[in-house]
Image (cartoon, rainbow, N blue to C red):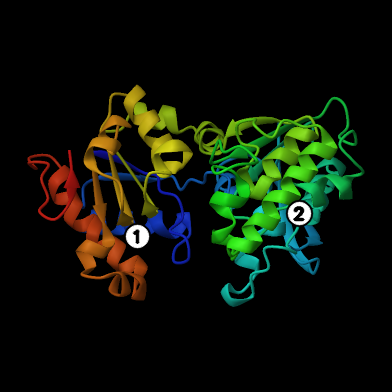
Amino acid sequence: MRVIVAPDKFAGSLSAVEAARAIAAGWARTAPDADLAQVPLSDGGPGFVAVLAAVVPGRLVEATVRGPLGDPVPGRVLLADDATAYVEAAQACGLHLLPAGERQPLTAGTAGVADLLRSALDAGARRVVVGVGGTASTDGGRGMVEALGGASSWPAGVQLVAATDVDAPLLGPGGAAAVFGPQKGADAAQVAALEQRLADWARDTDGDPDAAGAGAGGGLGYGLLLLGGRRESGVMAVVEAVGLPGLAAGADLLVTGEGTFDASSLRGKVPRGVAWVAQRAARPCVVLAGRVLVGRREFSAAGIDAAYAVEESAGSVAAALAEPAARLADLAARVARSWTPRGDHRLPGGTES
């Protein structure tokens, strides 16, 4: 039996590589003869460059860039052999660069993303794909645009792509400030202030705040579109780059996962991308997640056959977080009993189709 193990990171506990390793190790306990292919993925957030660097021929370009508060932080750009550069915005403005108790939603900015983009251009990129996600900022990409020299500063002849995990607009109840501001530490008054700033920025620049993905990355998507970029699904950009469709054609099962499997997972994150590939290859797809917050009807409609939660298997969230790799491996070992030959595809305690 050939199993493709293709998870995203488990935010705050495991990288995508670590999650894939844990799932494969647990699965092998139950099914030692299984052919397990580990294909860690990203939807454009933290880990975007690392995941691609493992499989895309090219070289890493090291850089020192401005962090979300202007302090210097290390960054890396992957320049592929085809002159496509992959940039991870979170390396410059990621929420993980700030301690949880020191989040500054009103001051965190995206100027460092401009530093990464310059590194890509200086390295000779003819196409730049920016992974957008996991940012600490809600400046609408203003810091990036101004640091580059304005909306008309992007060089002609170099393609620019915003690879996002959401299609949110810049403004309104489904926009960057209202939906994602609280995740970056903003209270109600700060959300209102951020919304007004974004509205002013959109008015002054005459961009399209309603464009799909404009609200991604705290509005970084808007800034990239303002520079002349176009939006693509982050996970699908990675799925194509790592060759997942071809791998799926020769597989019996695809296993994916992430920290919290919820409604947003079905819109544009890794589980949805893997399920899309599985559907087209006519293969089953299952999710292993830290928590499962979406019902069977919803995930079945997205092409996912079953979803299992580490917190249920471990007994509590605290137990799951205490040893995340070990508990994820334990869950994978249990799930493997149901999805190997002669299994009945039922696991007590799991959320299944």
Establish if 1 lies above or below 177. Answer: above
- For the N terminus, the image quarter is top left
Disc 2 is placed on an element classified as: loop
Q: Which amino acid does label 1 sit on?
A: Ala
Q: Which amino acid does label 2 sit on?
A: Thr
Marks 1,2: beta carbons within 8 A: no
Query: Does residue 224 appear in this view?
Result: yes
Establish if 96 lies above or below 259. Answer: below
Q: Mark 1 points at which residue?
A: 22
Which residue is depicted at the point 16% across and 43% down?
Answer: 340
Q: Name the residue under label 2.
A: 110
271 or 208: nearer the viewer = 208
Q: How crowded is mark 1: few (under 14 residues within 10 Å), some or many (20 or more)?
A: many
- Direction from residue 305 to residue 187 in the image, left or right: right
x, y percent for residue 123:
83, 43
Which residue is depicted at the point 73% across and 62% down?
Answer: 108
Query: Does residue 49 appear in this view?
Result: no
Q: Earlier in the sequence, mark 1 or mark 2?
A: 1
